[in-house]
Amino acid sequence: MPGGTDTDQRALGALLRRWRERALLTQEDVAERSGLSVRTVRRLEGDGLPRARSTSLRLLAEALGLDRADRARMAAIARGTARVTGHDWTGHSAPAPERGGRTRTRDGLARAHDALGHAEHACRDGREALSVLIADSLASTQENLSDEVL
């Protein structure tokens, strides 16, 4: 990343990781969407690449669905003309931790999956209860009609 220091590179990597996690994507997902290798995505998020190609950054921005402002910010940080500030971490989510971010995302997805299962179960129970009420109502209506006919 021309003009940027090692600290800038690590900060850009952390910001890329934050944007990826905000999009609920894995590094593998981003690699597939962008056409970059998983190794390149990992190295960009870490501090393994001394310089990111503008093409790679553009592909990442598209894969992450970044808006125009975030794309401009990423480019400026990569060029070394801007630094990551506290303002970059505000907004949709908190900064991603150094370790455990993927675990938190998986835990959140697991909780959402469990909640969906509970809702599905409640709907099934509701349908069954409604079926019983309708059957009872039809049975009593049929009995009343039988009594009226006789």
Image: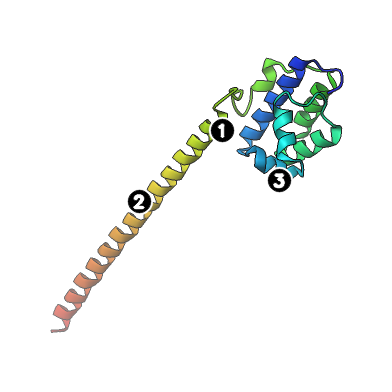
Q: Which residue is mark 3?
A: 32
* Residue at (79% x, 22% y) in the render: 77
Number of residues whose C-alpha sits closer than 10 Å to that of mark 1, classed few (under 14), some (14–19) or many (20 or more): some
Secondary structure beneath dot 3 equals: helix
Task: Name the mark on residue 122.
Answer: 2
Number of residues whose C-alpha sits closer than 10 Å to that of mark 3, classed few (under 14), some (14–19) or many (20 or more): few
Q: Quadrant of residue 25?
A: top right
* Residue at (37% x, 54% y) in the render: 123
Residue in front for this viewpoint, 35 or 121: 35
Residue 29's x, y, as percent? Answer: 66, 43
Going by the numbered disc 3, the residue's amino acid type is Glu
Vertical order, 112 against 140 (above or below):
above
Mark 3 and mark 1: span between their CA atoms? 18 Å
Mark 3 and mark 2: span between their CA atoms? 37 Å
Task: Name the mark on residue 102.
Answer: 1
Vertical order, 120 against 14 (above or below):
below
The tag earlier along the polypeptide, 3 or 1, is 3
Going by the numbered disc 2, the residue's amino acid type is Ala
Residue 64's x, y, as percent? Answer: 71, 38
Residue 68's x, y, as percent? Answer: 78, 33
Vertical order, 7 against 33 (above or below):
above
Q: Quadrant of residue 85?
A: top right
Secondary structure beneath dot 1 equals: helix
The tag earlier along the polypeptide, 3 or 2, is 3
Number of residues whose C-alpha sits closer than 10 Å to that of mark 2, classed few (under 14), some (14–19) or many (20 or more): few
